[in-house]
Image (cartoon, helix red, strand yellow):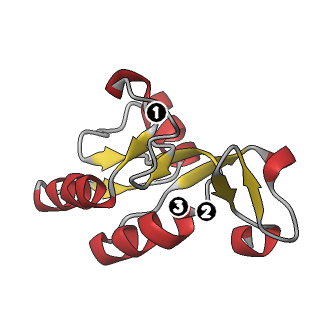
Amino acid sequence: MYHSISTNLFGLSDPYSQINTTPEMFSTQLRWLRTAGYYSIDLSEMVDGLSNGQDMSKKVVITFDDGYRDVLTDALPIMKQCGFTATIFLATDRIRETPMRFEGVDYLTWEDVR
């Protein structure tokens, strides 16, 4: 579960409270998963597999909360390079037709989501 793939610390100095993962660390994590033989599936596939008793040991579900624009600009290129997909749980009240900046963070637009 991720929120932001950026160096933005969201004004928080306590590392425990930060919701960002740097692009470099995200890349390292996905490359490790790929090298270890993992691949991504969507959330419904995971639920179905677990419900049916399938072996899910090399499958991961990658999720992002909120809908920060850096998911598109920073995370997506890394995921494509490593062959992974993700599910985004959007804060739909912050997604607009034109870019929105809220509390110093850019959000996806509806065009970005499409």
Tell me whether circle 3 and circle 2 mark residues in contact (CB < 8 Å): yes
At which x and y percent is residue 52?
Answer: 46, 33
Question: Image quadrant of residue 108?
Answer: bottom right
Q: Name which residue type carries label 1.
A: Asn
Q: How many marks?
A: 3
Residue 30 disc label: none
For the residue marked with disc 3, what is the amino acid? Answer: Val
Residue underneath mark 1: 52
Q: Is residue 25 above or below residue 97?
A: above
Q: Nearer the viewer, residue 110 or 84?
A: 110
Q: Which residue is mark 2?
A: 69
Residue 68 sits above or below residue 109 on the image: above
Q: Residue at x 24, y 60 (%)?
A: 24
Camera-side residue: 52 or 79? 79
Mark 1 / mark 3, whichever is N-terminal: 1
Does the image show residue 15? yes
Neighbor class of circle 2 (other Cα within 10 Å; few <14, some 14-19, many 20+) is many
SS class, disc 1 = loop
Amino acid carrying mark 2 in the image: Arg
State the mark number for residue 71.
3
Q: Residue at x 61, y 51 (%)?
A: 88
Quadrant position of the N terminus in the picture: top left
| Lower sequence index among marks 1 and 2 | 1
Q: CA distance from mark 1 to mark 2?
A: 36 Å
Residue 43 in the image: x percent, y percent?
A: 54, 44
Residue 27 x %, y %: 25, 61
From the viewer's perspective, tell me whether residue 88 is left or right of residue 82: right
Between 67 and 99, the residue placed more toward the observer is: 99
Q: CA distance from mark 3 to mark 2?
A: 5 Å
Q: At x 88% / y 70%, what residue is drawn?
A: 97
| Crowd band around label 1 with a 10 angstrom C-alpha radius: few (<14), some (14–19), many (20+) | few
